[in-house]
Amino acid sequence: MDYRPQEPIQPPTASEDAGAGFDIRALLRVLYKYKWGIVGLSLLTAVLAGLWVFNQVHIYRATSVLLIEREAPKFVSLDDIYGASAAHWEYYQTQYEILRSRPIAERVARRLGLPGPAPVATPRAAEGWRSLLPEGWFPEPQPPSEEDRWEGTVSGIQNGIIVTPVRNSQLVRISTESSDPAEAVRRANAVVDAYIAEDLEGRLQMTQTASNWLMERLQTLKEKLDESEMALQTFREQESLIDVGGVGTLPAQELALTTTNLAEAREERAEKEAALEQIRRARASGASMAAIPAVLSDLSVQRARQDESDAESTVQELGTRYGPLHPKMIAAQRELESAREVLTERVNTVASSIEADYRTALSAEQQLAAQLGSIKDDAQVISRKQNRLRTLEREVEQNRQLYELFQTQFKEVDASGGVQTANARVIEYASTPKTPVRPNRKRTVMVGFVLGLLLSIGLAFLLDHLDATLKGQEDVERRLGLPVLGLLPLLKTEHDKDLSPIRHFSENTRSTFSEAIRTIRTSVLLSAIDTPHKIVLVTSSMPGEGKTTLATNLAHALGQMKSVLLIDADMRRPMVGKAMAKGNKPIQKGLSDVISGEAKFAECVRSVDNSELKVLSSGTIPPNPLEILSSKRFSEALQQMSSHFDHIVIDCAPALAVSDALVLSKMASAVVYVVRSDRTPYKLAQTGVGRLRRVNANLIGAVVNRVVARSARYGKYSGYYQYDQYYADYGYHTRS
Amino acid sequence: MIDLHCHLLPGIDDGSPDLATSLELARFAVADGITHAVCTPHVHAGRWENQKPAIEALCSEFQDALDQASISLKVAPAAEVRIGAEIMDLLFTDQLPFLGELDGKRVLLLELPHGQIPVGADNLVRWLNSQGVWPLIAHPERNKDVIRDPARLDAILQHDCGLQVTADSVAGGFGPMAQQRAIELLEQGLVTLIASDAHNLEHRPPRLSAGYKVIKQVFGEQQADDLVMNMPWSIAGARF
């Protein structure tokens, strides 16, 4: 019991938007229709995927973990800090590439002793087809050479290295895969070892190169130093210089002194020369030389002049008192004269001494000048030597400094070369994998299933799209513009040869099929309640859609209530007579014979048990049925028959194939159009209905035949199927 | 409460198979609060060929049995008549069992095929109107055509007729779609009354209380009382 009264039941919301909902329902309908195909194809692909995957070799994956350290960068500026992460990334990216590089793979191969010894070439059985072909088309495959095997192994290892950085850490996972778990472990471990070894070796090589270069440079520098020292030494020896400092000072002092002396000598000489000149001039003019200061300065001259002047003054004094001849005067005169003579003699002597002095001074000056010249020469020579010495010394000094610098560096490099540390270490060596990483059986099967599912769903929609047949009540109503009088369900026995559907109603009164027939009967009768349809024509687009099934069963249903005549007017494929005979000998004569006058109506008509139904079969098949149906005799006969029966049901040929239905529809008061669900192309049905409409046939509606119960009912509402189930649960279907 | 649509009469249709079951159903109905029930076996040409006199006779027997078993349920005979052209003949021959009368018109419980509304159903309703008959359409909310598209009822509703909704449909016992349609019809004021359409104890018991409670919650007590007591009584009260 679904009812739960204690729950407050809200009024259901209004139905969803029909436009949007329709598409989804249409999609669901397609999926429902092809559900077995979809499930089957999906399972098939899943099974195929399973078969494939179970034949695959197991691949194991071993993983070792490596810590790659990076020297901490020294941040000096803000830019460095910002750039650091990029540099960091670059560094690690480089390391990952190194891990995947060929030298690592080669190292691994060497370490593991791969490839193993070449397999012994087993001579293959002569392949028959090879010998049939011209030589050289398919040469025997040569066993691979050593290089090829090595190449193959190395590139195999290289491609098999899977490097997975662990996020936000310095850890790296290195995985390798192999069909042998132990081999996978060996390889994974060999890769990390090879990486560390490779790194160390690289560093060593780098320092070695550096120290070699430094050594070379040192050698050169040493030679240069020695050379320059030697040159200095040689120069010193050559010039017999001992004290480099004393060389410069001695000549300088001497030079200074000599220069001073020379200046003095020159002054003296100039002085003497001037005095001499005065003397010469005095001599030439006859003037007294005594007035010349140089002469005058001589003490003996000065005394002589004093004497002279004294004598003169004596003379003058005596002159005033004595006459010139007074003895005293004569004595005084004599004295004066002698004084004058002494003076002259003295002056002459002084003058000649001045001349001699001049000559001495001149020669002294000349001597000094000569001396100074020689001293200057000496000093220049010494200075030149000094410069040369300094140059040599500087050279030595420079070479020494350079040499010492390189030597220090070399020592440093040499020292650092001795203590190398690896930048990486192994955190975790690979352990033997227990389960294979490939193939993932579950996933492969799932993928197979999903692919199959998608493929089959796509196919379903494709098929549905290509399927332009009429489907169910709504489709028929929409496409044909006809009300649906009823839906005839597909009967399980339909494939039988005994044409049982034709008699279904009379034999199974309680089935859904019979219920549908009764509904159609009701529709036919109620559609014209005031002037009941006298002649009901049943037709369809093509043969095999269920015209005869409907005509016979409807006639039966009508026959339960009224007197009914069923006429088989399909003279091309008559079915009614055969079906209604139910194993009895069918009456051969029928409609055509009645019209042609070859038989009486009463002879041909056949009663059906337990009902007021009478059947008139098609009779002898005429060469041209249309001619008979459009004859005046036929319409008269039909008129006559209708006066004897309440209803006449006519089963006639398909509306598309021939014009029989069009002709008959003019005489019929109602035309029922049969379509076969999921089989009748809607275009054909539209054409058939159109033809009938053009002749103004009274099409009262369509009947959809062979509706597959669930798929047809699975229509507009998703709850529909459930609803159906309710009916079944509540005993609606059980009563049949 | 008064139930105008139930299949309590034994062995006459797909309702109760025997008298014992009928009495059980009656007890259930009384327990549910039903005091009067109009028994409406199927009248369906070619399927349940029940005749008015036979129904009346059986109903009389059933009333005796109820009295004997001290079940305080009053029953009256009528029928749930399947739509069809034969109704016209039955009317002419006075073979149609009616539920009662409303405003001077005879009330006929008219059943549509559950799969669809037949073409021309509106013609019959119109014709019945012209004959002084007021059709009460049985459980339209469970009709597949109506579930697909409620507008399909419009042609019938143009004429003078009523709708009988199954009580359990309102309570959701016939699925969400039937419930939705039932509520929609109630909202539009198209429902004349609700009835049980009782067939058996398991799936379709004689129960009005569930639907009554829901209607009381959603539409109020007055409307609920009208649908289970006042309207049914004004139609069939004279028959008890």
Image (cartoon, grey):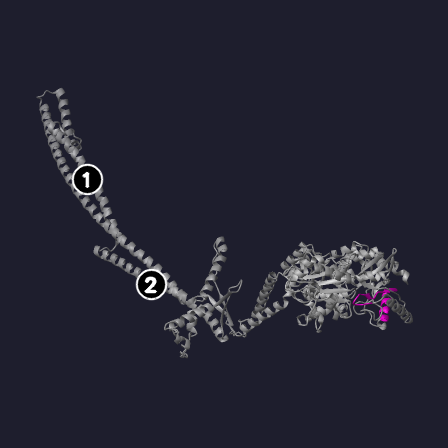
Closer-to-camera residue (A704/A439): A704
Task: Specify the quadrant of the image occupied by residue A505.
Answer: bottom right
x, y percent for residue A423: 46, 65
Q: Which residue is denoted by mark 1 in the rendering?
A: A265
* Closer-to-camera residue (A596/A388): A596
Label 2–label 1 contact, CB within 8 A: no
Upstream in sequence: badge 2 or badge 1: 2
Label 1: few (<14), some (14–19) or many (≥20) C-alpha neighbours in 10 Å: many
Q: Which residues are magenta?
A: B22-49
Q: Amino acid at mark 2?
A: Met
> What secondary structure is marked by label 2?
helix
Tell me residue A578's x, y (percent): 69, 70
Q: Are marks 2 and 1 on the same chain?
A: yes
Q: Is residue B222 above or below residue A159?
A: above
Q: Position of residue B80 (x, y in %)?
A: 82, 64
Q: Quadrant of residue A308?
A: top left
Say whether residue B41 is magenta: yes
A642 horizontally vs A458: left or right: right
Q: Which residue is labeled 2 in the image?
A: A215
Query: In the depicted view, which residue is nearer to us: A131 or B52?
Result: B52
Q: Is residue A347 magenta?
A: no
Tag 2 subunit: A
Q: Identify residue type, mark 1.
A: Ala
